[in-house]
Image (tube, helix red, strand yellow):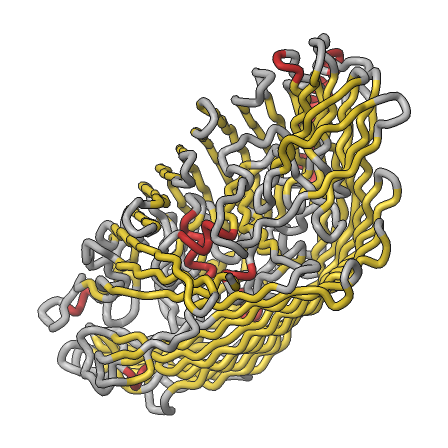
Amino acid sequence: MGRAQLKKNFKAALAIAVVLLGAAGCFGADATLVLQGRIVDEDGLPVSGAQVKLEHVGEPTKPSAVTQIPAAAGEPTTTSGQAVASGQIFAATSDDTGAFTIAALKPGEYTVRIVKATFFVLSGQTITLSADNTEFTFTLNHTEEVHEKVDVTAPPDRIDPSSTSETASLNATEIRDIPVPSSHTLQQSLIAMPQVLRDNQLLLHVAGARTTQAQYLLDGFDIGDPVSGQLDARFSVDAVRTAEIQTAGFGAQYYHPGAAVLSFHTPEGDDKFRFGAVDFIPGISVQNGVQFGNYYPRFSFSGPIKKGKLWYSESLSMQHTLSIINGLPSNANEVQQWSGDSLTRLLWLIAPNHSLHGSFLYNQANSTNSGLSTITPISTTSDVTSHRIFGSVKDQWWIGKTLYELGFAADESYANSVPKGTSPDILLVNGSEGNYYQALHSVGHRYQGFFDAIITGLQWHGAHTISTGADISSVDLSQSAQRTEIQALRTDLTLARLTTFTGPANFYVTDTLAGGFVQDLWTINKHLIAQLGVRADWDRFVQGAIAGPRLALNYLPFADDRTKFTAGWGMYSIPMNLSVIGQTEDQKEVDTLYDLTGRMVTAGPATSQFVQSPNGYQTPYFQIANVGWQQRLKKNTLLGLELLARDEHHGLVYETVPPGQIGATFVLQTSRRDIYRALTATVRHNWENGAYLFASYTRSNARTDQALDPFLGSLYFAAQQPASLSWDAPNRILSWGNVPTPIWGLQFNYFYEYRSGYPFSVINQQQFLVGPPNSLRFPVYSNLTVSLEKRFHFTGRLFAIRVAVVNVLDRSNPDTVVNNIDAIGTTPNFLTFSGGQDRAVTARLRFISKK
C-alpha cells in the first residue's frame, strides 16, 4: 500500500469514526455529585481494570450518568455513560492510576462491590456520599492460597464493558490446575486458550500467526527473542498471576505488536512473607535401568525488605527432562535437558503517588542429543547450550488524574549448538546418518525504552482518557557458523546430491525502531464506548515509516451489561526478523547433482546465495478486523462468539530467481501476504461449589501466498506458491474443567484437545519439492488428560498431591513423518508416522502453607 493510499484510508476511517461517534454524544447527562474513587492493593499500589458496582441505599433515584474509567492489562481505557436505573446500580472501572469516577449521584448511603481477577472480592462496604465527602479509597487484596478455606474471589465469567479488544486470559489458579501435558512448562499451559497452538516443533502460534509475529510482554516489556521475536524465555508457571492474549482491537500503545499481544503479569511481593514449593522430590526412571528421571522443582518466596516501602519476589525453577524415544536402541534413545530460570522482582514505593519497579530474569539450558527421533539417530543430533539475561526498570508516578511511566530494559540471548562430529551429514530416503552439518553460535541483544502519559477524567460529550507516548528499541545479532558437506543418497546408497558451503560464516546485523502514539478512549454514553488511536512507527532497516490508525467500538444494549457487541479495525506493524535478514550476510551454498550411478555430474556445481533487494523495502503490517459478541446467562454462564479477519501486507520472504534450478539467487522481498480467518465460539459455566467448565470450538483457515522459507542446507529451488501454513488447524475443540468431589475431598481436573492434523510437504531424495507445499496432513490430534488432587496436612503444614494421566486414550498423535517420496519400498517407508506422547502417569507434590 502506497503512502498516498494509506493517508487516504486513514482520513476516511477517522471521518467515519467522528461521524458515528459524534452522533451518539447527545446521550450524556449532567452530574449532581461526583464520586472520586481510587482502588489500591495491599501495598498501596493502584489496581487497574477493577469493576465497581455502587448500589444506592434508600429512596429510588431517577436514571443518571455513569462514568467508567477502565484499563485493561497494559491498555489504559475509559468509559462513561448512564447509570442503571433498575435497582439503583451504578458502574465504573478503574484506570491505570486506580482511579474511577461515578457522576450524577444523589447524596446518601451506598454499598460498594469491587471485582478484579486475581483479587478477593470487596463486598458489602458502605459509604456515605455528601457534598463535602466525595473522595474514597478502597483496598483489594491479592488472592494467595495460604489457608485451606473458601474465599470469595473474582469470578472469571464477567463481561468487562470497557474492554474494546478481543481478549482471552488464564489466571494463576487455572495455569496451576489445568492438567495440560507438560504442565511445568508455561508455554504448554497457554494452549488452554483457544487462540494458542503449538506446532510439531513445539513453537507457539497465536491466532494462526507465525511464532515471530506477535508481541510477548513481561510486565509491560518486550520479552520475545531479540533476534527472531519468538517466545523462548522461560520463567516459572508459579510466577504468573495472569496470562492475557489480545488478538484484535488492542490499543495504539503496543509497538510492533503484529498479529497479537500476549502479556504476562507477575507478583512483586507485599508485607507478608510467603513461600511455596512444587515437585521438590526427584523422579526416578526405570525405562533404561534405574536412573534420574524427570525433575521439575519450583520454589517461590516473597516479602518485605522494609514494610510499607520496599518488597521483593523471587521465583526459581529447574527442569531435568529425560525423554525416551520409542523405536531406537536402549543405549541411544535418550534426550536429556537441564535448564533453570530465576525471576526476581523488586518494588519500591517511593511515595504514595510514586513507585519504582525492577525485574531480572536469567535462563540457562543445556540439552544433549537435541533433534533425536526415529529417523534422526543420535549421531545426527547436536548438544545445545543457551542462556537469556533480561533486566528492566520502570518508574511510575501519578499527579492528579495523570499517570506517567518511564521504562528501560536490556536483553541478551545466547545460543551455541555443536554437532556430534565433523563427518558429512548423510541424508537417506528414510532418515539420516553421519553428523549434523552445522555448528552455530549466536548472540542477540535488545535495548528498549518508553515514556507515556495517561490523562483520565476529561469530559466532553462523555468521558475521555487520553494516552500518548513514545518508544525506541535497538536490536542486533552476531552469528558465526561452521558447516560441513551434506550428501543425499538414494535407496541403493548412490550419491544423488552433494551440498557444500563457501564464503565467510560470520556476520553482524542491527536494526533500530522508534515510534509514537496518541489514543482516546471515549465513553459516549452507557451503551457506546469507542477507542480511537493512531501510531507512527519508523524502521531503520526499511528506511521508512508507517502510520497505523485503529478504531474499536463496544455496544452494550442493556443496562446490566449482560450483553456486549464489539467491532474493530486497525493497522499493526510487524517486527523485523534479524534471523531472516541475517541470511543475506551468511555463506553461499554450492550444490551438485549426480546421475543414477552417483558418479556422473548432471548439474552443477552451482552456487546459491541470499541477497537483499535492490529496490528497497516496505514496512510489513497487518490489517485486522473483528466482530464479537458476549452474553451472560443468569449469573454463572458466559457465551462468546468472535469473527477475526487478518491480512498481512509486505511480509518478509525470499523469492527464488530463477526458480526450478540449482544455483538460484534468493532475493529478500517484502511481498508476502498471509491470511487468517477464524470463527471462535466459547462457553464457560461456574458452579457455586467452585466447579467450572470451559469449552470452545474454532473454525479457521491460515494460508499464505508464498509458502517456502529457504535456509542454508535446505533449499528447494522451487518457485514460491500458495499453501496452508504448516500450523493450520481448520477445526479445533478445546475443553477443560474442575470438579471438587465428595470422595475424600479429591479435586478432579481434565484437559481435552481435538484438532486437525498439521500440513506437511513432500520431497524427493535430491531434496526437491514434490507437488504443492503442505499438500498432505498428519492424522487428527486428540488428547485427554485427567488428574486428581488431594490436600492433606503433614507436620503442621498443608500439602497437595496430584496424580495425572496424560493421553488417557493412548492416541498415537505423531509429530514426525517420512516425507521423502523415494522412501517407497524401504523400512520405514514413505508416509510412516511416528513420535508423539504415549500414555503416561505423572505426579506433583505441592507445598501450600503452614497450618
Closer to the camera in the image, 645 or 58: 58
- Seen at 42% across and 80% down, the residue is 367
715 left or right, relative to 83: left
Give coordinates of residue 47: x percent, y percent.
Answer: 70, 44
Closer to the camera in the image, 353 or 708: 353
Instruction: Answer yes or no: is residue 26 visible.
Output: yes
Q: Quadrant of residue 812?
A: bottom left
- Seen at 72% across and 62% down, the residue is 448
374 left or right, relative to 572: left
Height in image: 452 above or below 62? Answer: below
Q: Quadrant of residue 400?
A: top right
- Seen at 67% across and 19% down, the residue is 526
Give coordinates of residue 430: x percent, y percent.
Answer: 20, 73
- Seen at 58% across and 54% down, the residue is 264
Instruction: Answer yes or no: is residue 684 visible.
Output: no
* Residue situated furthest bottom in the rendering: 422
Give coordinates of residue 446: x percent, y percent.
Answer: 67, 67
Q: Quadrant of the N terminus?
A: top right
Total residue callouts: 0
Q: Quadrant of residue 472?
A: bottom right
Give coordinates of residue 666: x percent, y percent.
Answer: 48, 65
428 left or right, relative to 65: left
* Residue situated furthest right in the rendering: 132
Height in image: 88 above or below 221? Answer: above
* Residue situated furthest left in the rendering: 825
